[in-house]
Image (cartoon, grey):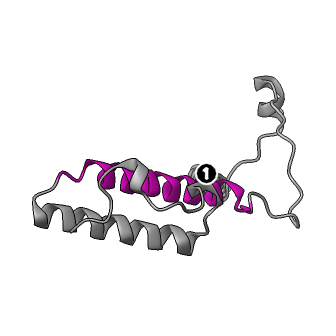
Amino acid sequence: MSAVKNPQQMPTTLPLSQMTIVQLDGELAFWTAEIASDERWGISAEIAIEMRLEVEAEIVRRHAAERRNATFIVDDLGVRPSTIAITGSGRARLEYLPTRFTIAFAVVISIIGMCAAAALAGQRVVEFETRYAWEAV
């Protein structure tokens, strides 16, 4: 049968805020057993349920406080932060560096253009030779 019938019959213990985590776990186990006992005997377990909820709330509060007090590494101290500079569009165009692909594409186009120019120049030389060769003969 349940050991606690009303709040006046509850054993005097430390307040929940002064208990250690081990004591809170013991208190939680006690009130869980009280609830099971009350339900087994068909007695109202309201007081035990309220006490168990208070113990659970204290445990949750303690865990939240531990998480708030935990240290987090936010930034690596060995890395110097870089400054953020917002430049205007004109200066950005002046400081633009083309990519490797753009440079390679420009080189290939210029080589193709020089080959085409050399071929047209060679064709023109052949035309001049054939034209003046007939006159020389």
32 versus 62 height, above or below = below
92 versus 4 height, above or below = above
> Pointer 1: what residue?
113
Can you tell which quarter of the image residue 108 is in? bottom right
Asked whether residue 70 is drawn in magenta, I would say yes
The x and y percentages for residue 27 are: 45, 67
The x and y percentages for residue 65 are: 63, 54
Q: Is 11 on the left or on the right of 108, as rendered?
A: left
User: What is the residue that sits farthest to the front in this orientation?
Assistant: 9
**Magenta residues: mostly which secondary structure?**
helix
| Disc 1 crowd, CA 10 A, few/some/many (<14, 14-19, 20+) | few
Q: Is 12 on the left or on the right of 79, as rendered?
A: left
Between 125 and 90, which is closer to the camera in this rendering? 90
Between 2 and 108, which is closer to the camera in this rendering? 2
88 versus 3 height, above or below = above
Amino acid type at circle 1 is: Gly
Where does the magenta region start and end?
A: 44-73
**Which residue is found at the position 10% from the left and 58% from the top?**
42
**Which residue is found at the position 19% from the left and 62% from the top?**
38
- Look at the image and tell me in which quarter the N terminus lies: bottom left
